[in-house]
Image: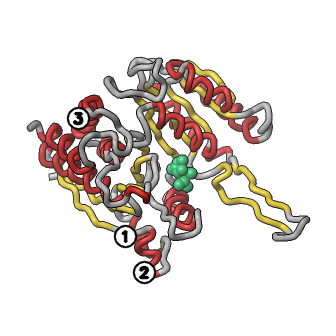
Amino acid sequence: MKTYKIAVLPGDGTGPEVMREGLKVLKAASKKFGFALKTKEFDLGGVRYKRTGETLSDKTIEELKTFQAIYLSALGSPEFPPGILERDILLKMRFVLDQYINLRPCKLFPGVKSALSRKGAEHIDFVVVRENTEGLYAGSGGILKKGTPDEVAIQTSVNTRKGVERCIRYAFEVAKTRKRKQLHLVGKNNVLTYAFDLWTRAFNDIAKEYQTVKTAYHHVDACCMYMIDQPEVYDVIVTDNMFGDIITDVGGIIQGGLGVAASGNINPNGVSMFEPVGGTAPQFTGLNVINPLACIRAGAMMLDHLGEKKAATAIDAAVEKVAGELPGLGVNQMGIGTDAVGTKVAKLVAGK
Ligand code: IPM
Ligand code: MN
């Protein structure tokens, strides 16, 4: 039987609660579709940091590299200054494992209420391909004369030809497989005249290799407007790290909320990591009120990536059905608990 070695990171806050449901569903899928998952749990996040002072050591990184995928819920805790766990664990994993794509589908399921009351499932179905290792996230910059009236803070956006090209090429590959075959480059080439000059030239060069894909360009501010007013214009979007971060929160909310938004941090030639878009929601820890569907969908994306297409499709279909039946998808709106939502999906996947 095919066996996949998966590193599981339940993380902080409500992370472990949604991860439990994600694993429940993966287990049902593995039984039904005849493969095995060999999981190992890592207590990375606030728990380990508090106990040992470790955020993410070289030794742990080497160990993570031996897995076929990483399944993560969410990291971050109000107990520590903002950024420590996020930057030193989450972003570090994305960087050192060279997960250069952040793939974020935005699809409104039938029966689910969007924040956009005028829009239904037929209007919201696109994918954002976010560059995941460069841009403003690269950590290039510094503060001069800190704490003095003359202080200067510089944060540089790093855009390499190689990094931009591989991201754009990936987006064209995604667009090629979709029904509408439309790809929008989203940027700000009227202001960021260096960064998006490079992006635009690379985009136009690569477009020549993909004659079947229709292309267009939108400024990021206009993109936010379109996402609210006419989300149906989008099929696939490719953009840089910072803009991708921002627009996918808009994408999250229009597809029914962060309770259903999933993502994959992908290195096509290495170890990829799958996680919900939302955070740890620490104020709800232990209350069994958080929606696990985003984490469950991230699990389906992981199976799809590993080649278990049928299992992934079955989980997606089950999520779609359960999402459409719940009275709401937000915290305290589901009518049933986190665990009961996971059980419903798992039963459907098992064919019960
Ligand atoms: C996300 C998150 C992260 C990001 C944070 C937690 C560092 O917002 O995955 O979108 O900015 O990438
Ligand atoms: Mn974000």
First of labels 1, 2 by sequence position: 1
Please tell me in which quadrant of the rendered image residue 345 appears. top left
First of labels 2, 3 by sequence position: 2
Determine the CA span between mark 1 and mark 3: 29 Å
Q: Which mark, by number, is residue 186?
A: none
Tell me residue 85's x, y (percent).
Answer: 52, 66
Determine the CA span between mark 1 and mark 2: 10 Å
Mark 2 C-beta closer than 8 Å to ligand 1 = no
Is residue 345 found left or right of 41 in the rendered image? Answer: left
Depicted 272 relative to depicted 106: above or below = below
Tell me residue 148's x, y (percent).
Answer: 87, 70
Q: Residue at x 41, y 53 (%)?
A: 273
Q: Is residue 169 visible?
A: yes
Amino acid found under the numbered disc labelled 1: Asp
First of labels 1, 3 by sequence position: 1
Q: Is label 1 in contact with label 2 (beta carbons under 8 Å)?
A: yes
Amino acid found under the numbered disc labelled 3: Ala
Q: Which mark, by number, is residue 43?
A: 1
Q: Which mark, by number, is residue 51?
A: 2
Image quadrant in which the C terminus is located: top left
Determine the CA span between mark 2 and mark 3: 39 Å
Q: Residue at x 27, y 49 (%)?
A: 338
Q: Secondary structure at mark 3?
A: helix
Q: Is label 1 in contact with label 3 (beta carbons under 8 Å)?
A: no
Q: Count how many numbered circles sit on residues in the image.
A: 3
Amino acid found under the numbered disc labelled 2: Arg
Is residue 273 found left or right of 337 in the rendered image? Answer: right
Q: Secondary structure at mark 1?
A: loop
Q: Secondary structure at mark 2?
A: helix
Residue on which disc 3 sits: 318
Q: Is label 2 in contact with label 3 (beta carbons under 8 Å)?
A: no
Q: Is residue 164 visible?
A: no
